[in-house]
Amino acid sequence: MSFDDWLAEQAAKRRDAGLERSLVSRAPDDDLVDLAGNDYLGLSRDSRVVAAASGAAHRWGAGAGASRLVTGTLGVHDQLEAALAVWVGTEAALVHSTGYHANLSAVTALADADTLIVSDAHVHASLVDACRLARGRVQVVPHLGVAEVEEALSERTESRALVITESIFSVLGDAAPLTELADVCARHGAVLVVDEAHGLGVAGDGGRGLVNATGLAGRPDVVVTLTLSKALGAQGGAVLASQAVVDHLVNRARPFIYDTGLAPAAAGAAHAALDVITLEPALVQRVNTVATALADTVGVDRPAGAVLSVPMPGPTEAVAAQAACAAEGIRVGCFRPPSVPDGISRLRLTASAGISDLDLARACDVLKTVLP
Ligand SMILES: Cc1ncc(COP(=O)(O)O)c(C=O)c1O
């Protein structure tokens, strides 16, 4: 089969299964109410954050110019790493060019061939890919299943183990039982890796996330990964852990070592966003208020963070509801099998502190009429 024929066949299969994806550009000034994005605190357009991005680019250049171990470590990275570690409460931090890279780094560098990796069934694709790349055996356990984690750890033949979870899950928006998982890990000599992509900025004291809120930040057997692209409104990712873990990653994590350093503008923006959150903790309260109003409107439990999951009768109804919302100026996310971890089609709504009271009221009115 020729390359062209193969591509056409692949495209036809996706079309027949109703799984075709396409990119839709967003205008800079569209007036849709965005309940689908991850700019949870509305900071990506905050003038202080944008000015910091521009200032960092002017000072350090448009790109870092090299990988971090060559000449691509800049003051703007050092400052951001120090600020992130202090904010969340860990000894050290290591900034990466994306959250995806941070997950690849943490899992692949911390698991060797003699490590069992126990992963919650709902973790993000970047953690799934990290497990695939890692050298250790991978065991996937049911979502939120603490007993199953304990069983896997106690029956393992490997001398080391890594347990992988998100703090707040990206599709269902539910929270992991972090305290119980950390206890199980401590009993079985395992390391707990927690992806705070959807916890940071929206959960815990002043938005410091659930690892901080549960008192686990700073524990040597707990490793946090995060993205700078959601609540912090920028781009990039980080691993927060002990200095020993960070030193190990600098020496062993290929997604860190063989990648150009985070762009200065993104690092500057993320640092400014941290400063804004610290100065204005009301932003974190606001995102929770918006999330609560949305949850009450659509009749689901109040979420642990900013993500609301609204189960729909089926894929057709989910797509139709998404289109009906869009026609009324409200952008919502729509997830259908096979992109949903539990096979249930759903709308995914996200709250943002950047939504005005007027837009929130409009969105709630539309959701009331559109949802079954
Ligand atoms: C849970 C989770 N982890 C990691 C990532 C990847 O982060 P980034 O977009 O910075 O690569 C995402 C989102 O995209 C995510 O939802």
Image (cartoon, rainbow, N blue to C red):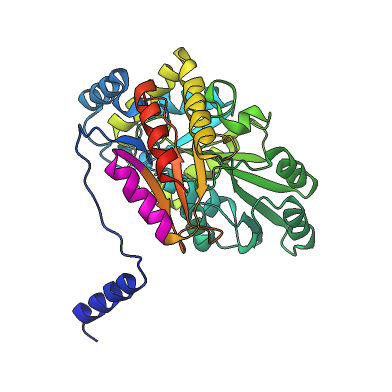
Does residue 225 appear left or right of residue 136 in this picture?
Answer: left
Task: Reply yes or no: does residue 207 show up in magenta.
Answer: no
Magenta stretch bounds:
316-331
How far across and down, in percent of the image, does residue 100 sit?
Answer: 43, 48
Does residue 301 appear left or right of residue 98 in this picture?
Answer: right
* Residue at screen point 60% across, 34% down: 242
Question: In which quadrant of the rendered view does residue 315 lie?
Answer: bottom left
How far across and down, in percent of the image, does residue 95 sit?
Answer: 43, 36
* Residue closest to the eye, 64 or 313: 313
Question: Is residue 258 visible from the viewing direction of this image?
Answer: no
Q: Is the magenta stretch mostly helix, strand or loop?
A: helix
* Residue at screen point 54% across, 42% down: 173
* Residue at screen point 64% across, 54% down: 143
Question: Is residue 45 visible from the viewing direction of this image?
Answer: yes
Question: In which quadrant of the rendered view does residue 264 lie?
Answer: top left
* Residue closest to the eye, 327 or 222: 327
Ligand 1: give its quadrant: top left
Q: Split into 4 quadrants, where in the image is the N terminus? A: bottom left
* Residue closest to the eye, 61 or 15: 15
Task: Reply yes or no: does residue 327 show up in magenta.
Answer: yes
